Amino acid sequence: MTSPQQPGSTPRDGRADTVPEGEGTVRRTVLPGGLRVITETLPTVRSAAFGIWAGVGSRDEEVADAGASHYLEHVLFKGTAKRSALEISAAVDAVGGDLNAFTAKEYTCYYARVLDSDLPLAVDVVSDMVAASVNRPEDVEAERGVILEEIHMRDDDPGDLIHDEFSLALYGDVPLGRPILGTEESINALSRDRIHGYYRDHYKPSDLVVSVAGNIDHDEVVRMVETAWAPYLSDIAAPSPSAPRVGGPDVPVDPSVRVLDKDTEQAHIVLGCEGVRRTDDRRFALGVLNAALGGGMSSRLFQEIREKRGLAYSVYSFTSQYADSGIFGVYAGCQPGKAEEVLAICREEIAKVLDGGLTDEELERGKGQLRGGMVLGLEDTGSRMSRIGKSELVYESLLPVDEVLARIEGVTLDDVRDIAAEVLARPQALTVIGPFEDADFSL
Amino acid sequence: MTSPQQPGSTPRDGRADTVPEGEGTVRRTVLPGGLRVITETLPTVRSAAFGIWAGVGSRDEEVADAGASHYLEHVLFKGTAKRSALEISAAVDAVGGDLNAFTAKEYTCYYARVLDSDLPLAVDVVSDMVAASVNRPEDVEAERGVILEEIHMRDDDPGDLIHDEFSLALYGDVPLGRPILGTEESINALSRDRIHGYYRDHYKPSDLVVSVAGNIDHDEVVRMVETAWAPYLSDIAAPSPSAPRVGGPDVPVDPSVRVLDKDTEQAHIVLGCEGVRRTDDRRFALGVLNAALGGGMSSRLFQEIREKRGLAYSVYSFTSQYADSGIFGVYAGCQPGKAEEVLAICREEIAKVLDGGLTDEELERGKGQLRGGMVLGLEDTGSRMSRIGKSELVYESLLPVDEVLARIEGVTLDDVRDIAAEVLARPQALTVIGPFEDADFSL
């Protein structure tokens, strides 16, 4: 068994190991082999969320691997050297826990949310899944059918499908543009060896982050993780954690129009452009802009399209951030015969913001919306676990909640005007799903 | 202004007014006019969830009113004597709160989740919406388009649509069987006067329950609610709260097969039958049965259909409870060419449980799953608010969490065998959405 770095000592990579955080405290320990353990103690709750994050996602896949990160995420539930798939799920079901995982473009997360007294079980099961997956050929084969059905289910839900289509419309057929799920073709082509190789290459302890939030003690968590990971940390070559994914040069965008002819009741529309990268200081100003344009029921798009004209049930704007790029977009679902009108209103509202910026009232309301939404969101141990785990993978350091709130508070009308002038003037991509032909839409 | 009943005094309808509840305490006060205020104090959180519940839902609608409860729920966001739709949404957006509503078959709920310091604002805005809606003809008209788009969106999502179709397949074209949203035809036919009449008939203070959970003080909440409701409580004829909806004779079921021919990628299947009513003591045994058959990743259906054979991504069983009926069903989404095979496995697994019951291990795991799921679910102020608010409308008294846990713990293998023998042997209804003809499926 390896011995952990003493809690409180200086971490190997210069990151702070203790950050006071509202009611909680965030602490960080790096185990030999480079496995990071980051925890947030929230003494007033009775649950704990335990996660293991891998710094790999669909944008790390070559064409031949498309969908491998997500496929592997599924296979990790299929069994380890000492547990079958049933034993993995039964262990967590038996305590009423929530065991799940998700794959994004830049990371993958496996987690269990349990009562605090069941944390040792969660640490043991999730660590085993991630550290000791055997990826049996017959399991990889059975799971291929499951992934294909997940793709089909996504295809049957246009409100979901449209976001995958929009990524392709904005970035083109490049890793960041391709769907996380892969395609039927790529999933059918992926071999067990390729999946297993992907696992060996991307799930080394130094690539991983263990994050835990809830009614827990950091030192105890470190001891539990150390015990669970002992066989896998002893003779690792690279002792330092992988560097965070902070991004290189801008990802080129290649905006186009994609029209998917489908016999749907609604036209599903996304119009958007490149936003800002995750580390861009202007992301707070863009967040306020997003809130005012389409972030809530009082936003301009909601008011104009739904409240005044009754043209849509679902209408909103959104932002996504990646290491070296981002997305700003608007979605609306409406009658196919009203698609042109709705699209015209979206364009008009975007033009109005470009022209005149926001009002003082919209600025204050947008800030309040971001602030309140953030604080309310952090009442859940799962959200807390996600915040610290993801931050470790994608930022140089954890931005404390108070600092985030101060940055939001600091946004001015000029900041919003500046980011609007830059982002909203960028070349736009457009995706429409519905009973249409390509020629029905253009930019 | 009316004066509230003194907290701590005996409520008018014989319900307990204080129930100790884990860390929190549940308290209840009835205001003049029969408006109930029920709160749960959770001193360790920083948020508050404020809800107003109306004891009316889609099953209270005649054919000519189909969809009226839900339509009205939308219209209540459109404006009051003193606030426009924008002023309603802007007030809550400005503090980053979550303002929303939902309509069910037996009740309707309007709620806001906010930081505890913003509770006075939530009380004021949500109370105003519910108490003083003006239901302007032009607003009812604009919202008609929104509802129609919500229906179209539901139609475009087969995983959602299938549950509405299944209710029709099980109960037939009766109030409990019809969709909460109504139909295009019924929504187009509903007049402003009909909607307004529905509001006047079903939103009297004695029909409503105010429920609040979070870092709040019961007496303060009662004072805030009293102030907000003062103009509407003074001269009400019926001073006692409406009786809870505890149900009469069994609702007759009329199981059939419904096949919806749609050009989807997947076959979406629900097979089910009548379950148990909300007050049936055997609901805990049925809950354990549901967990073991299709409630988690370790369940029989998940193992057989997804884990071993890779035939589906989404497969689960579910229960619903109403005052005088209930549903037990299984869902699976699979390749259309595999629909028959998946359906055969579902039937086989149901037959096996009927035949041999559960194992000791499944019993214990099922109980653990219900217990843990319940306790973890109650860490959220929104869930706590829902539990006490809904309970007031549909139960004679609130079942404390410890009592629920004890009831779950008390379930035996014989209890499960008995409820399986009764429920799983009942006549089944079947619904399938996909590229099929009616003749492709039978019972």
Image: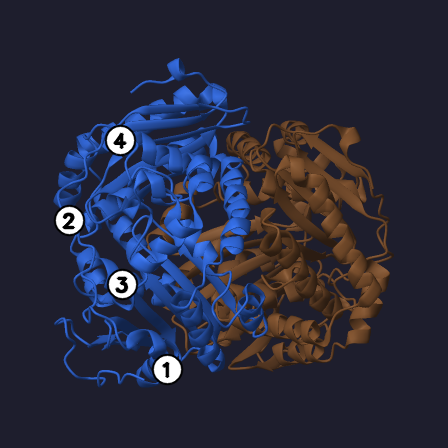
Chain colours: A brown, B blue
The correct choice, above or below, for B297 with respect to A94 in the image is above
Q: Which residue bears the numbered disc 1? A: B227
Left or right, residue B437 beside residue A407: left
Residue contact at pointers 1 and 3, CB within 8 angstroms: no
As measured in the structure, the alpha-carbon distance from the residue carrying label 1 to the one carrying label 3 is 19 Å
Using the image, name the chain to which the residue with label 2 belongs: B
The image quadrant that residue A118 belongs to is bottom left
Q: Which residue bears the numbered disc 4? A: B350
Of the residues tagged 2 and 3, which is closer to the observer? 3
The image position of residue A362, as x and y in percent, is: 68, 71
Helix, strand or loop at disc 4?
Answer: helix
Helix, strand or loop at disc 3?
Answer: helix
- N-terminal of the pair, mark 3 or mark 4, is 3
Which mark identifies residue B412? 2
Q: The residue under label 4 is which amino acid type?
A: Ile
- N-terminal of the pair, mark 1 or mark 3, is 3
The image position of residue B358, as x and y in percent, is: 22, 40
Quadrant of the snapshot with the N terminus of chain B = bottom left
Left or right, residue A232 beside residue A116: right
The image quadrant that residue B373 belongs to is bottom left
Q: Which residue bears the numbered disc 3? A: B207
